[in-house]
Image (cartoon, helix red, strand yellow):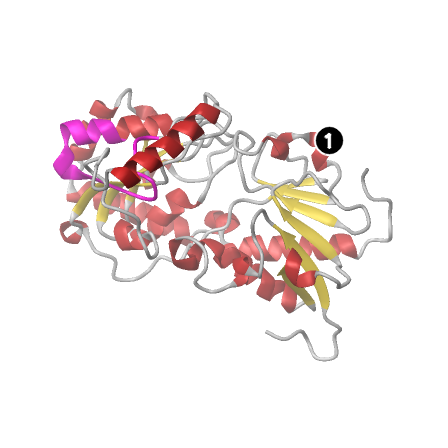
Amino acid sequence: MPPPPGQTLRRATLVASHMHDNLPFTPGAGPNGGEFFLPWRQLREHLLRQGIELNTRDRNAGHEVAFELHLNAQRRVPKDRPCYAYLYEDPIVRPLNAQRAQLARYRRVFTSNEDLIDGRHILRLDYPNDLNLRPDLPDWPARDLFCVLIASNKALLRPHPRNLHALRVETIRFFEAHAPELFTLWGPGWDKPAVRPGRWGRIEKRLNEWMAWLRPGTRPFPSYRGVIEGPKREVLDRARFAICYENSQGSPGYLTEKIFDCFTSGCVPVYLGTTHAQPPIPADCFIDRAQFPDAGSLLEFLRSVTPERYAAYRRAQADFLRSAAAQRFSNAHFCEFLCSQILADLAQPQRRDRA
């Protein structure tokens, strides 16, 4: 998409770990059939209409750069150009995202973390999502999967009590033991034993990978059905319910794509994770895992859900996705807000950058 006629094209850099050769802007690249990178492709198009070409660092080598946008706080923040940060990861995954001295080195910081937002230097910007509700989604009788869990088998390098990976594993084991006919597991890494946190967990993971190579065909998780090669909706469109746990519990404002992916597939999520000063999603759109003392009571409830109650969940989801309240979580809002805030800041008179 070309810039406006007569406008000189400037360059900007997206700094993201291990991202090069404009990978985040390449259609079809990345997980979930490339849909994971969709907001970044749309942001690039949005900036290009303003005369700014956003590239990965290697593509801008040797060129003057108008600004840098960092995906998560980086240890190195150049002082010779404006730098901005979007905090994608929860601080328990990336502790640098909560270090205020490091964040102060940026001109603006964008995050959903309600512990950090001040409305001036650190601005609210939620995780972006495709909120389009697709027509003709399968109804209750046509969904051949009762309950699914889609996640990666990986744990934190630094153990943390709010991490939910262990609860995912506990839930998987419960369903496999008590309702194997009602549950399927999807995602990378479950052909090996559950990963444990910490450095010893990483070492154990490598040993398990080696053992899996020596003994192919072993199944640590009998419910495992493999990696979804295309978009997650290929499974979620078939599922009535999905175990939908964030990577951490109790992180204020941290709400990722997991619950929205369920909504746009007409699947009812069993959600656990974020806290908000004001809950942004109506309670009748999902099943709150925190309301159940154990996996047994959750399973009993899921079995009790009637087609009529399931239809009520779906109506509530559709109403929410169409509402103005949902738009703060949309790809369009993410691109427009990020672009407008950065351009407005660049237009301010020159000032000393933060040390």
Asked if residue 115 lies left or right of residue 297, the reply is: right
Relative to 175, is 225 above or below? below
Q: Magenta stretch containing residue 135, yes or no?
A: no
- Tell me the amino acid under the disc marked 1: Ala
Q: Residue at x 58, y 46 (%)?
A: 17
Vertical relation: 279 (above or below) 262:
above
Of helix, strand and loop, which one carries label 1? helix
Position of 321 with respect to 324 (left or right) is left
Image coords of residue 184 (percent x, y): 21, 41
Check the picture and name the quadrant holding the C terminus.
top right
Give the image location of residue 348, x and y in percent.
82, 53
The residue that label 1 is drawn on is 101
Q: Residue at x 24, y 38 (%)?
A: 215
The residue nearer to you, when weighing 317 against 128, is 128
Residue 29 can be seen, yes or no: yes
Q: Quarter of the image holding residue 303?
A: top left
Task: State which quadrant residue 177 falls in.
Answer: top left
> Which residue is at 22% across, 24% downward?
297
Q: Is residue 191 visible to us here?
A: no
Question: In the rendering, at what x and y percent does residue 59 appear?
Answer: 65, 62
Question: Which image quadrant: the N terminus?
Answer: bottom right
- Looking at the rendering, which quadrant does residue 305 occupy? top left
**Magenta run includes residue 186:** yes
The part of the chain drawn in magenta is 172-194
